[in-house]
Amino acid sequence: MDAPGKVTGTALYAADFALPGMLYGKVLRSSEPHARLVRIDAGRAARLPGVRAVITAADVPDVRYGGSVKDERVFARDRIRFAGQPLAAVAATSPDAAAAALTAIEVVCEPLRPVFDVAAALAPGAPLVHDAWASYTALPILHRDGNVCNRARIVVGDVERGFVEADRVFENRFTTSSVHQGYTEPRAAVAQWDSSGQVTVWSNTQLPFEIQTTLAEILQLPPSKVRVIVPGIGGGFGGKLRIGVEHFAALLAMKTGRPVKVMTTSEEELTAAYARQPATVAVKTGVTNDGRLTAREARLWFDTGAFAGSGPGVASVATLMLAGPYRIPNLLLEGFAVYTNKTNFGSFRAPSGPQANFAVESQMDIIADALGLDPLELRLKNIVREGEEGPTGQVLTAVGLEECLRRAADAIGWRDRRPEVGRGKGIACGWWTTTGGSSGVYVKVNPDGTVALNTGAAEIGTAALTGAAQVLAEDLGVQMADINVVSADTLSTPFDFGAQGSRTAFAVGNACRAAVADLKRQILALASKHLGVEESALALREGSVVGAGKRATLGELARISQASGGGLIAHGTFVAPPTPYDTKRVEGHVYPAFHSPSFHAHATDLSVDAETGEITIHRYVVAQDVGFAMNPAAIEGQIEGGVAQGLGQALSEEIVYENGRVLNANLTDYKMPTARDVPRVESILVQHPSLVGPFGAKGVGEPPNIEPPAAIANAVASATGVRITSLPITAEKVALALRERAK
Amino acid sequence: MTFDYHEPTSVREAIELSARFGGDGRFLAGGTDLMVQIHRGRLNPRHVVSLQCVPGLDGIEVDGAVRLGARVTHRRLESAEAFQGALRGLAEGAEVVGGHQVRNVATVGGNIVNASPAADVVVVLLALDATLTCLGPAGERTVALDGFATAPGVTGLRPNELLTRASFPRLAPRSATVFLKAGRRRAMEISIACVAARVTLDDLERCQDVRIALGAVAPTAIRARAAERHLEARPLTDGLMRETGRIAAAECRPIGDVRASARYRALLVATLVPRALARCLERIKLGAP
Ligand SMILES: Cc1cc2nc3c(=O)[nH]c(=O)nc-3n(C[C@H](O)[C@H](O)[C@H](O)COP(=O)(O)OP(=O)(O)OC[C@H]3O[C@@H](n4cnc5c(N)ncnc54)[C@H](O)[C@@H]3O)c2cc1C
């Protein structure tokens, strides 16, 4: 539904949004990674031409906010915790004038001993990133300790016994890099206050209702005084979940009495946004000689940066991913979110998925090689199946994993795994959740028979609202073209948990089903009265109610209702039913089970240049269990995009840090793949209908991003015999590893 | 970022303007280097003198010597009929610059004067013994491309001089050129290392004339002179080509940076030089009547 506008360039994005008299805001960011902030003097900047306001910590309420741990402030107050942390903001009549003013703000600070990575942060005697961490408000469930802002844990059985039962025990360590979501539209917000003291913020956030809450907290207003509207989103992938620039726009607009727009630069995106958490993963797995997994002890440490942000939750999800989609009787799995003096890394499409999957799926191949087993056979021997338990005891249903593995392997020609020297095939599989949360919709029939769908969710570009509208059209018996969507306005649309976690089409679609059920009752009752036909003899078909040779169009009925009863309108809601799990198995866990899980396998065929290390991908196949394919073309689009992003993480993308500063904060040296780097992606849609999703659908948006790093690593190992255990797998790493081996 | 924009309509006017502005002025061709540098605050010219409407700077002439006007775009180099044969290396250098949008506007002159060590087309022109024609208030002079760049971003172009063209002699029979580039992705990529080779064989299949030029492995694009000498009057055997690669790797002076380590860059030179030579050999054989 949103595609024609986007293709023809008429779609409106938040970055396009402008108001008369609008000022431009820019943010002064720290160049020091860890320091005591001694003094900040904005006097000279405030007097520069075009400058209308300069604000620092002294000008804003002293509020600490954060979803899981309240550890972050709008501006650094006395302590700077990462290079890129906001220190001040300027509003001026042009972006250039605002930028010029930033350079005129004087900052005096005294450097402190920093911790730049997880190892340094966990070392005995390491400086604390937050001295007062223990006094912060936080989710009570978290296990926090100094620089660790959560340790999530799953314990099943007895791993020590499991290792004793094993014939072989494998221990491997993997590392991954921070990567940016690469959305094409930078984060942008325009804020305007009205005379009643209400602020309206137009933003490209994925979560308007969360931003409303956070803004209310920061501005110390009741949430009803904050209205957040999403005019459009040019990509988000998790990077636009948490507050970005909305608060700067709102505070500057309050100070100046004029609308203010704030938009990030590429440099800000790469130094001070919510890029994916870099991870270190240690996996120890016990296995019998015939390939049965007996135990796994795995730890994953996320660098969460200066603030907790999504870290504690993502560390929790990671533990489920460390189990893999495997039946392992003894587990000790831990996910840590660790503070460092870096930007607050965050959620990125399938948060924790690629990092954990890269580790455990690489190790599956290491095990298969060592035991002389086919990697596909090893997986088939251990994967979870229908009715079995997930790691925390949830009962798994609609498990399409074996079909995914077999079909991906067949499609890639698995039997001929090393067709020539320097060429090899790799496979990787995984599972993922369809995030829960609630959704509400209003569905209204217009007097011309068209239907308005009013939802609090935002269309993020996944066609999720198209999916929801399809559900609505199907149930109500109307054409897609007759549906108009109004979305994402905290004042006028019903609540929605937001565009995250592969849930929008799933949850909004189900809310539509509930609304249609109510609407149908209203329509049939009215039609029965109007046509003089028993309700039971009436049916909804192609935009009309028909029965006993009579017919009334929806438009007619809407007009009658408007004249007599206030119109045809229904409120539908949905909340994913809780997925039962064994509470005794988890600790510090904010995401203990995967709702309506999806299953997937990726397979690739590639060649490696033995001298330069350059990798050429010949084919890439994805078999994904989508439950029910509501919109196959849109799902294939999600798979292709997810793989393209995944290949970036696998092969070329990396935010490079040196002493807490980013060395490649520009799009010349931060290497997202181009059209020439991404092969054609072949999609196989496997359909094992979920019990809860509309028509059996499962979440599809995030999963394609999970397996590419592992699939590539396994194919490179198959092609060369060299195992790369850190991401990205650059040509340089491969070439140098081949050199080392030749010695 | 503010500057006055000027659009002269003749070479003379362009030079006059730039003489007037002195160090405050900059020529603008495609702007793909200049505008990025201005945006990133690395340059801050008060006057920008566009070459867009200056006639006579965009010719490709191939009668005897080859002359490329400074404003010839990479797109034109890659699609010119003249560079599909023995001069194929020039098209190969041009066709990997940036992406389509960049190549449609970015120019040969800009590539040369910007003096990046990783300028792809400069590396090919070095292998072709190109000379440059510079025109200033004091008149015209011709200088060798080799040695023109003295450090990253620094050239021997005098203040107020305009680069009008790059020229190189026509190739002898039994010649071929090749350009190879390594980078992390296949487009929009600054070379981690690149190599241009030009080979002319004599009737006994020995190297009569060889040039090997390297990019991104020294403060400027360079010729690998020791490697060239090593091939003098010898037939291009596999072993010799590999040795030559090692010699070239030993004479380059790469740095390690966020794009690649020095070690990997040297390894690429050792690999790409023999590949470029072998491909030249192949092309000469294919092209031979
Ligand atoms: C996205 C992107 C990708 C790129 N990829 C590559 C790549 O793969 N390989 C590569 O080599 N380069 C690459 N570049 C760099 C750039 O495109 C090339 O160096 C290009 O040839 C510059 O030409 P231009 O006409 O745009 O130069 P401009 O930016 O207009 O000028 C560059 C400099 O030369 C001066 N100048 C220009 N013409 C003249 C003249 N006739 N006389 C005197 N001075 C002059 C200008 O004052 C300026 O200082 C890339 C750039 C971008 C933005």
Image: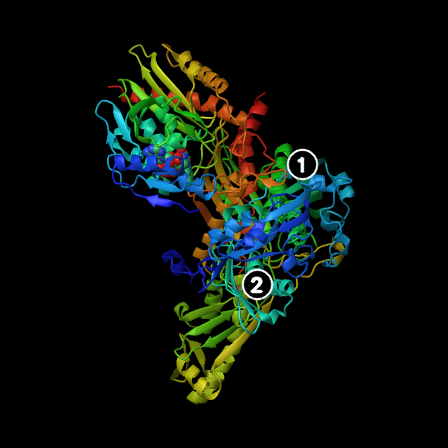
Q: Position of residue A371 (x, y in %)?
A: 64, 34
Q: Is residue B193 above or below residue B185?
A: above
Residue on which disc 1 sits? A172
Most foreground residue, A571 or A287: A571
Quarter of image, res B81: top left
Q: Tell me which amino acid carries mark 2.
A: Lys
The answer to whether B263 is drawn above or below residue A467 in the figure is: above
Spot the residue most to the left: B63
Question: Of tags 1 and 2, which is closer to the observer?
Answer: 2
To which chain does the residue with label 1 belong? A
Residue A80 tag number: none
- Earlier-in-chain disc, 1 versus 2: 1
Q: Is residue A522 above or below residue A59?
A: below
Quarter placement of the C terminus of chain B: top left
Q: Secondary structure at mark 1?
A: strand
Residue A268: x %, y % from top left: 54, 48
SS of the residue under disc 2: helix
Q: Is residue A601 among the parts visible in the rendering?
A: no
The mark found on residue A255 in the picture is: 2
Query: Is B57 placed left or right of A569 in the picture?
Result: left
**Crowding at mark 1 (Cα within 10 Å: few <14, some 14-19, many 20+):** some
Residue under mark 2: which chain is it in? Answer: A
Residue at 59% across / 24% down in the picture? A740
